[in-house]
Image: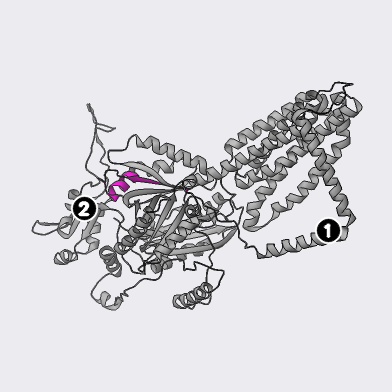
Amino acid sequence: MLAKFFIDRPVFAWVIAIAIVLGGSLALRKLPVSQYPSVAPPSIAFNITYPGASAQVIEDTVTALIEQEMNGIEHLLYMEAASELGVGTLTLTFEPGTNIDTASVEAQNRYKRIEARLPEDVRRMGVPVTKPQRNYLMFISLYSPDKSLTNVALGSYAAANVLDQIRRVKGVGEAIMFGTEYSMRIWLKPEKLQGYHLAPGDVMAALRAQNVQLATGEIGQAPASAGQQFTAVIVTRGRLQTPEEFGDVIVRAQPDGSTVKVKDVARVELGAENYNIFARMDSQPTAAIAVRVAPDGNALEVAKAVKARMAELEKYFPKGIAWEVPYDTSRFVDISISEVVYTLAEAMLLVFLVMYLFLENFRATLIPAVVVPVSLMGALMGLYVLGYSVNVLTLFAMVLAIGIVVDDAIVVVENVERIMTEEGLSPRDATVKAMGQIFAAIIGITLVLCAVFVPMAFFGGSVGAIYRQFAVTLVLTMMFSAIMALTLTPAMCATVLKHTPGKEVMPSTGFFGWFNRFFGRTTTGYRNGVARVLGRPGRWLMVYLAIVVAMVMLFTRLPGSFLPEEDQGYFISMIQLPAGATQERTLEVVQQVEDFYLKQPEVHHVIGVVGFSFFGRGQNAALTFVRLKDWDERKGKDGAVGSIIRRANMAFFAIKQAMIFAVNVPPIPELGAVGGFDFRLQDRSGQGREKLMEARNMALGMASKHPALAGVRPEGQEPGPQLMLDIDRAKARALSIDIGQLHETLQSVLGVAYV
């Protein structure tokens, strides 16, 4: 018999238990920690930058080419592209369980095939491939307490000294800066160019030719002339550094010896690389670095590591720069995990107290107290092997499993105690006999319970992804519980329990005596109640049926949801002005939104980003991240996130020049930036954008009338005003005007050109 083997070899049983504890301890240190399991299918994104290009140009010349090449990638579910002024994103979503690293390599190899067909500006800017996460872990804000530095100065310092340091932190998947850094800006003067008969292309060609890094060699390099005694490296000025140096670049040399320089046809200054997006913290300029976690990263550890790295970098900050973490989603994850761990500890303590209350034997209580943690550590080891994480659901499964785990140990201990008392056997002999009686029962109970929960591991979709880890954790815990009940528990019973032959079982006294008498009276009352119920089975059957009917009615009337929304301590506000609105108008609205939030007693920090939102980029778009004070500082219903959001939306309704809506974040960040759901319309018949927009507006109108829907709104940027420039190609050809040079001129004067 298996149990007898370990009864005779208790040291071997302890070695197995210690090995399980060590394995679980090591697994716990390496297991990723998150609020919920990963439920979103894996995806990769191509990030396209085409300065000055319209959304349609990016779609036609870049996105469409990449899409065609990506068709046929193994395990690809769908592709989704979004194009805006100057930027575009192509997201590839794969089947759940796909190795995202392998998929990323295949996608990049396919991209290389068509890279040469892309516009030169796109190739020069690069098309990085990322593994996007839907939501941000935290924001790091660099600001100037004495207000001596501008957005550009803060952004330039952050880009040079902080951004790459954050990206190198283990577990960081992406770190992007909402801000800008210094760049040499050359503002062309068209009238001056015309006066000198120059084109923007001439200026760019001169800059490319004269702003280069030169390798000049050395004097005396081998093989040197006979008698050469010294060598010297030749150094010359390469890249230009100052506005004056760029202004002195010669664009044209005249026959009379005079020259036309860049400063003669342009204004040269050290300005911002990008004026389209900037951030603010509590209405003050800031350089905000947004951090996302890698797909396999530990959110809590990453947040701690990032803060530790910032504390190191702070020592080298120049005067006038400080940092703050105004937005940190790891706080809620940390508190959620801590609460479940606290509940787990409470459950274990209560179980042990109840066992001691009924067994009235410290030695007997000690055995389950040792076995339960060993079973839980074994489950952690199994989670690590399966690639799962420590999250709210796996910990909740352990909380539920404690009762089952304790039950296995109690069955063994109670049976051994009974045999020792009734038959006067020694602990070893009583344990051998007890295990012979209950061995099959323990195996049977474990298999039955596993059969109940194992099917949950095969659920499909996002629901299956959530409950799979819950079910597997329960099954693992029960399996290790059964193993302990057949190995360590009988070994401990044979060595720890103590029996004095011939000693009568005396009635308990004191508190235990009072409890036993009270429990005896309760048992008698329950027995009498059951007898009365059995005397009138028809009446009580009707009561049971009424309870079932009421339960069904309540179940059908209760609202359903994927997961309930929670107060996570922060929320988001989306700001959208009419298409074509300028950045100045958007900033005015953002200031009104910030002023409202900063007046609320529950608000701790407000991060505002102008020029960017989750629905698209543009001068008319913005969003705010609102961090609330800690939960214990927000008392009553008015301090809950739902109440704050309702107050905000009522106040924003009065701002007529923009569409503003505050929304709570979803319980699972991977499924989107905001709560609710969205859907897509496809133009499969090729009717064009206008017809598609008509169908979209019709669908929105119908959805907004449905009583069960609220906050119905379009996603993405509305088409803005456009001026159609129709180039007469025949006349341009007749005048010997190169079409490519004409496009380059338009891009340089009206858009942005990188040299």
Is there any visible trace of residue 581 in the rendered image? yes
Q: How many marks?
A: 2
Residue furthest out toward the right: 423
For image coordinates 29% across by 50% down, the residue present is 151
User: For numbered disc 1, what is the local secondary structure?
Assistant: helix
Q: Earlier in the sequence, mark 2 or mark 1?
A: 2
Task: Report which residue position mark 1 lands on.
Answer: 540
Nearer to us of marks 2 and 1 is 1
Residue 224 in picture, x, y percent from top left: 26, 31
Residue furthest out toward the left: 256
- 10 Å neighbourhood of mark 2: few (<14), some, or many (≥20)? some
For image coordinates 34% across by 73% down, the residue present is 721
Which residues are the magenta region? 137-159
Amino acid identity at mark 2: Glu
Residue 235 in picture, x, y percent from top left: 23, 38
Q: How far apart in space, not on screen, are marks 2 and 1 (Cα)?
A: 89 Å
Is there any visible trace of residue 614 in the rendered image? no
User: For numbered disc 2, what is the local secondary structure?
Assistant: strand
Judge left or right: residue 414 versus residue 74: right
The mark found on residue 269 in the picture is 2
Residue 661 in picture, x, y percent from top left: 44, 63
Judge left or right: residue 751 versus residue 678: left
The mark found on residue 605 in the picture is none
Q: Quadrant of the N terminus?
A: top right
Residue 459 in picture, x, y percent from top left: 68, 56
Quick one: 579 or 160, which is closer to the camera? 579
Q: Quadrant of the C terminus?
A: bottom left
Tell me the colour scheme of the image: one colour
- The answer to whether the residues at label 2 and label 1 have Cβ atoms under 8 Å apart is no
For image coordinates 66% across by 52% down, the residue present is 467
